[in-house]
Image: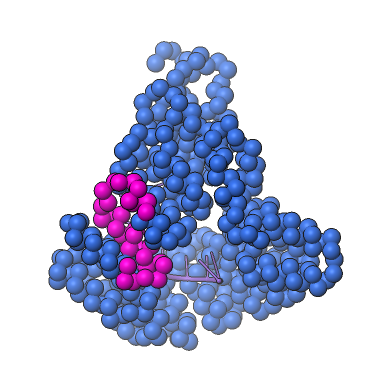
Chain colours: A blue, B purple
Amino acid sequence: MAGNKFSSYHLAAALRREPDPAAALRLFLNPPASATPFRYSLRCYDLIISRLAAARLFPAMESILSRLASSSGPRPREQLLCRVVSAYGRARLPAAARRAFAHPAFPGPRTARALNALLHALLACRAPLRDLLAVCRDAGTPPDACTYNILMRAAAASGSLAHARHMFDEMLRRGIAPTVVTFGTLVAALCAAGQLEGAFEVKEVMVRQYHVLPNVYVYTSLIKGLCEKGDVDAAVALKEEMAGKADLVLDSAVYATLVRALFQVGRKGAVVGLLEEMKGSGVVADTVVYNAMLAGFCEDEKDLAAAFAVLDDMQKNGCKADAVSYNTLVAGLCKLGRWRDAHELVEDMPRQGCHPDVVTYRMLFDGMCAAEEFLEANQVLDEMVFKGFAPSNDGAQKFVQGIEKEGDVVLLESVLCRLAKVNALVPSGWEKAVSGALNDPTELRLEKQLDSLRIA
DNA sequence: GTAGGGTTAG
């Protein structure tokens, strides 16, 4: 490195230091004026693309990817491709995930790792199993155990245990050994379908026939399955079985499941003992456990005062409330008709370091509509649309009917216009509209629209 | 951040 000249090494360091992704982008595009021209290292590309992907600044990310594609330097690793594909999955942009998978910046052929990233992204977007199978066929990449695990989960998600079983059989035929994740997926699917006998059978067979021991994931699914059948005692007994196994460590998920179940069957008194046991065995009450209690007090006990006391406890114990915590409280308040309190709570969220998500807004909006407070709901809709969140179908429908009844034609028009903006009138229409622009840096005129749709 | 469980809506 020659003296103190600004090089790609310094740029990489500066990118790492910059907390704001937009500022990092500016830094990448316009390095300090003192810098002599230098070739961007792959490390710099990797850093900026990863950062933009995480921040969902997709148009900017795509333009850097194109630049990378046309540069003559070394090719990026597939790991970066996986990150881009996953980011599109999290943003629920399936078409963009597919295009990224085939992006020319990344040298082929694709490995199972990239294929699996795409499959998982599509699963997150609730693509049907047949779409996932078509992707596998077209990619021509040999599947691995992880591929089959994703396919099995997709099968279960579309309600077909038969297909999940079929995937399992196919996996065996192709000589791919099922892992503990495979069995965990099967058990979860069976439990979700209420087929407890089958689920417990898998637990036996995985040990006997495949020599794979059930882990805490398998047990937690079974515990939840038993709870849903109303057999909390059997669920607690299963937890005891776990506690007796040296290779298993009870975690907060197990306790959260049981806490929620105890509330549901009206045995909230038993929760105290459970929490003490937890403390005694060194399991920290985390957000998920507190959220289970919040849900118990809101949904089951309808005791909002107790729920807010739990929220205070969380803060006292250094446990940060997340969107699920607030959503539970908002739903509880709205169900009691206390939409004003719910509104106040939502407005306080950012100050508490938690941003409302789509569920928060939908619940508040629905709560106001249920109370026939359409003008208040209209204000919330404004904020939602600004952030790119669409109301639920039911909420939007009830709202439009309410506004119609009020007879304010101008307002109605503005409402329909805003609903159209977030495509709440024609579900999933907008992604098609922008599909051509995403991989084409010369055509970023839809950038603003996309930006307005990204989730903060 | 290639895969599985647990707390909120659907």
Name the residue nearer the viewer: A385 or A238: A385
Relative side of A284 to A198, left or right: right
Residue placed at 60% from the left, 51% from the top? A430
Q: Quadrant of residue A410?
A: bottom right
Residue lying at 36% horizontally and 86% vertically, measured from the top left:
A231
A399 in the magenta segment: no
Q: Position of residue A95 (x, y in %)?
A: 49, 48
x, y percent for residue A126: 46, 60
Left or right: A369 in relation to A212: right
Judged left or right of residue A313, residue A122 is left
- Image point (64%, 71%), residue name: A394
> Magenta segment, principal secondary structure?
helix
Residue A81, x across and y down, in percent? 40, 40
Tally the numbered discs: 0
The answer to which of A11 and A252 lies nearer the viewer is A11
| Residue A221 vs residue A69, the one in the foreground | A69
The correct choice, above or below, for A59 with respect to A238 in the image is above
Q: Which residues are magenta?
A: A134-163
Magenta stretch containing residue A151, yes or no? yes
Tell which of A252 and A417 is nearer to you.
Answer: A417
From this viewpoint, is residue A445 visible? yes
**In the rendered image, which quarter contains the N terminus of chain A?**
top left
Q: Position of residue A58 (x, y in %)?
A: 54, 41
- Residue at point 45%, 29% (across, down): A68
